[in-house]
Amino acid sequence: MDVGPAPAEIKAPSSRKRRRIEDVKPVRVPSKASTRSKAADTPAPATRVGKRLRHTVSTGRALAAQPATRVFALWRQDGHYYAGTVHSLQTGTKYLIKFDDETEDHVDVAMLRRCELRVGDGVILCHGNLRGTVVGISRMQSGSVSVEVDDGSDTISSDYAISDLRIASRAIQSHWKDRTLTADSIVTIIRPKSLRTTPSPSGMSLMSTTSLKNKKPFARTGFVVTLTVRTKHPEKMKDSVMLAIKHNGGTVIDDWSSIFPMEGTHSQSNKRWIASQENFKFKPTKPEFEGLERVFLLADDYNQKPKFLVALALGIPCLSNEWIRDDYLDKQTSPDWQPALLPAGFSEALSARVSQLVDLDWGNCKEHLTDIMSNTVASKLFSGKTVLCLGSDLVPLPSRGGRKGGLDATQDASRVVPWIMICMGASRVEAATEVKFASKDLPAYDYVVVKEATDFPEDLQDDVTLVHVPWVKDCLISGRLLALPSR
């Protein structure tokens, strides 16, 4: 990604914003942490929801009667929204934002939201990086809100300064659409902050003496585990991983179908099966999965098993199981999962191991999980396409004995291919044992998938796009549509 040079008249935004949150050191200029710790003594300017005076109003007295617009603005260096004040209009639709931690940046109006927190909003504590939910807003006008944090060992509600909170970009996209701003609603004149004291202690001081001490690093985090056939003593390794997950407050998920029930519609005496995007959604099958806010796949190495491929298609990070095992054995917490990313696999077309394409802020808000099909980072190679999977081995089995059809042991790996196609963005996927059981003529499908190249039907029309499962897998691993296989 190309990053343009920072304007000369402002401080260049740098990665120090994150360091100031997590690595506080006493310096002459107040750091982010020191600035935010003063929030209990220095409330943020009141948030106004109503329409502001237009920024081009020439009467200084009229503008002075309005407080400067308070916003949550995007800080591009870490992809989160932080509280700040609109300072001035720059060029076009960009405004100079003075963040509460004394950093500043030019931010387009499309990346601004009213500084208006609501009950139920998901937030992240700048100190400790814990996720929480807003449960009280009665003190918002004075610059603080009540936030409930569940760290796996206890649930605590405390007051936090708005400047001590950040919002995940995905949460903004999903739930803040009615808190956007226009030029007509922005006031660009900053008024001095009034200094007042507040009788309540800062929420961070309470947090640091209570829940952080017994924090469970993987609370509300689910893990699907898969091992390669090359693993020695697989049962012993699996037991070690399971123990580490539970020790750190995580939840073991047997299979993706336990949280994404993979159900379609069978017909023609189970010789035809049809599913669409609407059939794939977060729908936990067990009570212990309902509170999950993020999920990962753990493996000893990359592989082409269904669990791994589904995770790749959905953009769920696939991590080395050493990440959590080392964490357990060393009795340390490892909040950063990015260094543990496994390769997506070996691409035969590219003759190279390829990295995964994932959101590096994955899991910082529950919308990544609850609205997983809207993940814009995952390469949806078959977005909007219709697909026919042709062959008896590619038709998912109907549910039996109360068990749902999916990736469980009753399903052959090839029967999960239709679901992988859904996860790769296909709008509608059909599977049929034979051509005669398909609901449409073959040219009506964007792709017709067979199990192997040797399964290509003879005498097909030229206008049928015919591919095989190994090609689909190689496209998924490569992160791009490859040249079509020859017939």
Image (cartoon, rainbow, N blue to C red):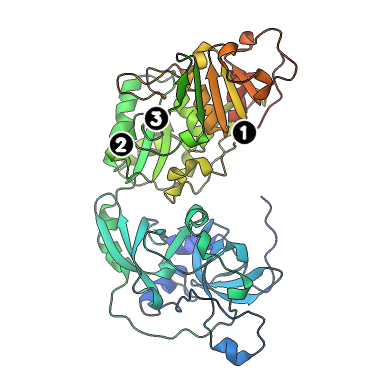
Residue at mark 2: 244
Residue type at mark 1?
A: Gly
| Mark 3 vs 1, N-terminal side | 3
* Residue drawn at x 60%, y 25% as measured from the top left: 387
Q: Nearer the viewer, residue 428 or 107?
A: 428
Query: In the image, which disc is placed on residue 479?
Result: 1
* Residue drawn at x 30%, y 23% as measured from the top left: 402
- The vertical placement of 82 against 317, above or below, is below
Q: How far, Cα to Cα, is label 2 from label 1?
A: 32 Å
Residue type at mark 2?
A: Ala
Q: How far, Cα to Cα, is label 3 from label 1?
A: 24 Å
Q: In the rendered view, does 336 fall on the left or right side of 345?
A: left
| Mark 2 vs 1, N-terminal side | 2
Q: Single out the mark in the foreground, 2 or 1.
A: 1
Image quadrant holding the C terminus, namely top right
Residue at mark 3: 257
Q: In the rendered view, does 229 fall on the left or right side of 243?
A: right
Q: Single out the mark in the foreground, 3 or 2.
A: 3
